[in-house]
Amino acid sequence: MSIFIIAEAGVNHNGSLELAKALIDVAADAGADAVKFQTFKADKLVSKTAQKAQYQKQTTDAAETQYEMIKKLELNAEAHHELMAHCKTKNILFLSTPFDHESIELLHELKMEIFKIPSGEITNLPYLRHIGSLRKEVILSSGMADLGEIEDALDVLIASGTPKEQITVLHATTEYPCPIEDVNLRAMQTIAGAFGIQTGYSDHTNGIEVPIAAAAMGASVIEKHFTLDKTMDGPDHKASLEPEELYAMVSAIRNIEKALGNGVKKPSPSEAKNMSVARKSIVAAQPIQKGEILTEINLTIKRPGNGISPMRFDEVVGTAALKDYCEDELI
């Protein structure tokens, strides 16, 4: 099964529809399967006095509140219609993460195929119940969560009506950028083993090597933030990939996908032709007369490999030569 790559535009459109469409173009050109935005009503998401995260204070106006920051980044229903239509023309799947009940309903009415639950909502019982009741495919991010919290969230989604087979859990570390030593990629495999569920990885590190490694470790979904320009104003640009990096990441993941193969160990079509060149056969170490007994002295092992396999050496030693042999001639 192909690795599902989500190019996370998030709020990197800075509230501009034109920027959002340009991000869709980049994600499609890169070969991502989906481009993902965020759907929220600032009034329903944060209180007027909520503080910003430390990384947000460093990348935006430190004086403004979290509410003021995200109010500028809202996309209304009309914008969603327009962006979904643009995604269709670019043959890429439109996704958006809802952050409140009104946003869940909007995306459901728009017939969005997959619901992505962000790490911050994994402990939000009414929210999980709402999404679970839609019986859609669900991708659940698990940043900041332990196994018990993941289990509780899965129980709610499944009890609300979403089959386990339709849920993928993404391992994630909620820090922007995430320090390499905090990635803990093996936790993705721990989640898969604990719940017998599809897993993937949502990446917040700098660069592209970690998501590529996650692909090699069996991720079925990879999510990564991207932007048109890391130097733009906004909370997430700095920890995002620029277009060329996104192209390189998708290309590398597609190559890893091919390289993983089917797991059957046998000669590949490309190497079969080299077997006779690289392997060896039993040959005459010196001239041998017909009827002479073949021994470890008058036999040796040399290339090419299109004669009797050296694995049959013990069968050949002690038998009589059936003909005359020159030195180096295949037995």
Image (cartoon, rainbow, N blue to C red):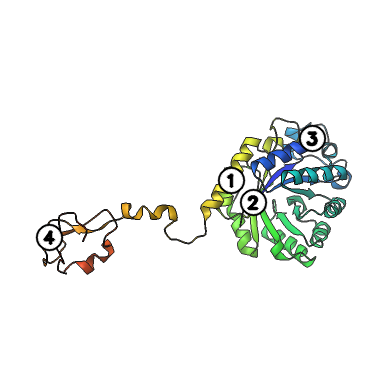
In the rendered structure, are the residues bearing label 2 and label 1 in contact, judged by CB atoms less than 8 Å apart? yes
CA distance for labels 3 and 1: 31 Å
Q: Which mark is residue 18?
A: 3
* Relative depth, front residue between 314 and 277: 277
Amino acid type assigned to the residue bearing label 3 in the image: Glu
Residue 12 visible in image: no
Spatial CA distance of label 2 from label 3 is: 29 Å
The answer to whether residue 4 is seen in the rendering is yes
Question: What residue is at 63 percent from the left and 55 percent from the top?
Answer: 220
- List x then y, in percent, for residue 329: 19, 56
267 is higher (above) or lower (below) than 83: below
Q: Which amino acid does label 1 sit on?
A: Val
Camera-near label (3 vs 1) is 3
Q: Which of disc 1 and disc 2 is earlier in sequence?
A: 2
Residue at 27% in and 54% down? 304
Of labels 2 and 3, earlier in sequence is 3
Q: Mark 1 points at which residue?
A: 210
Quarter of the figure with residue 248: top right
Q: What residue type is labelled 2?
A: Tyr
Element at label 1: helix
2 and 4 marks in contact (CB < 8 Å) = no
Q: Name the residue under label 4.
A: 288
Can you identify the residue that label 2 sits on?
Answer: 201
For the N terminus, the quadrant is bottom right
In the picture, the quarter occupied by the C terminus is bottom left
